[in-house]
Amino acid sequence: MAPASVPGPAKPRPAVQRPNPTRLRFALGTGGIAALSALLTAIVAPPSATSPSSPVAIPVAQSTVTQQRPIQYVQLSAGEAPPPGATVIDAKAPKPITIVTTVPAPAQQPVVVRTTQSGTVVP
C-alpha cells in the first residue's frame, strides 16, 4: 500500500451554532403563568355585577304556555257531595283492562364467521 492511500485522522467539524432557548423558555413561562392566573381568577373570584348603578331591564317575551294540571282522584264517603265542577266517576263502572301478552321469539341459528388475521372472511 502506498502511504498516500492511508486515511489520516479526521478533521474535527466546526461546532454548529444552536439558537439560544432562553427567550422561548421565558415566553412559554410567561404565557403559562398568565393562563394559570386567568383560571384561578375565574374559579376563585365570585361573580359580580357589571355596573351596579344602572340596572338593565331584561325584556320578557310573552308566550302562551299551557300546562295540564295533574288529575287527582278522591274517593267520596257515603252521602258526601263532590266539589263543584268535579267530574264524578261511578265506582261501579267497569274498570279498563290492559292485557299484556308475550310472544316468544323464534330460535336463531348461530352464525360462525371465520376470518384471517387481516380481517378477510374465509368461506
Image (spheres, rainbow, N blue to C red):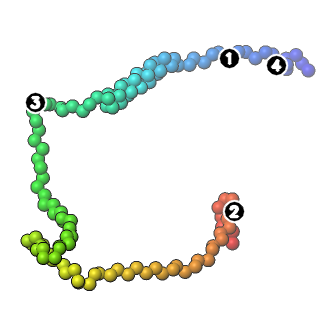
Real-space Cα distance between discs 3 and 4? Answer: 89 Å
Q: Position of residue 15 (x, y in %)?
A: 63, 16
Reading the image, the residue beneath label 2 is 116
Residue occupying image coordinates x 46% and y 21%: 24
Mark closer to the chain start, 4 or 1: 4
Q: Are there few (<14), some (14-19), or many (20+) residues within 10 Å of tag 2?
A: few
Mark closer to the chain start, 1 or 2: 1
Mark closer to the chain start, 3 or 1: 1
Observer able to see residue 31: no
Residue occupying image coordinates x 22% and y 80%: 91
The numbered mark at residue 53 is 3
Q: Amino acid at mark 1?
A: Arg
Reading the image, the residue beneath label 1 is 13
Q: Amino acid at mark 4?
A: Pro
Mark closer to the chain start, 3 or 4: 4
Q: Nearer the viewer, residue 96 or 67?
A: 96
Q: Nearer the viewer, mark 1 or mark 2?
A: 2
Mark closer to the chain start, 2 or 3: 3
Q: Nearer the viewer, mark 4 or mark 2?
A: 2
Real-space Cα distance between discs 1 and 2? Answer: 54 Å
Q: Nearer the viewer, mark 4 or mark 1?
A: 1
Describe the element under mark 1 as helix, strand or loop.
loop
Describe the element under mark 2 as helix, strand or loop.
loop
Residue lying furthest left: 84
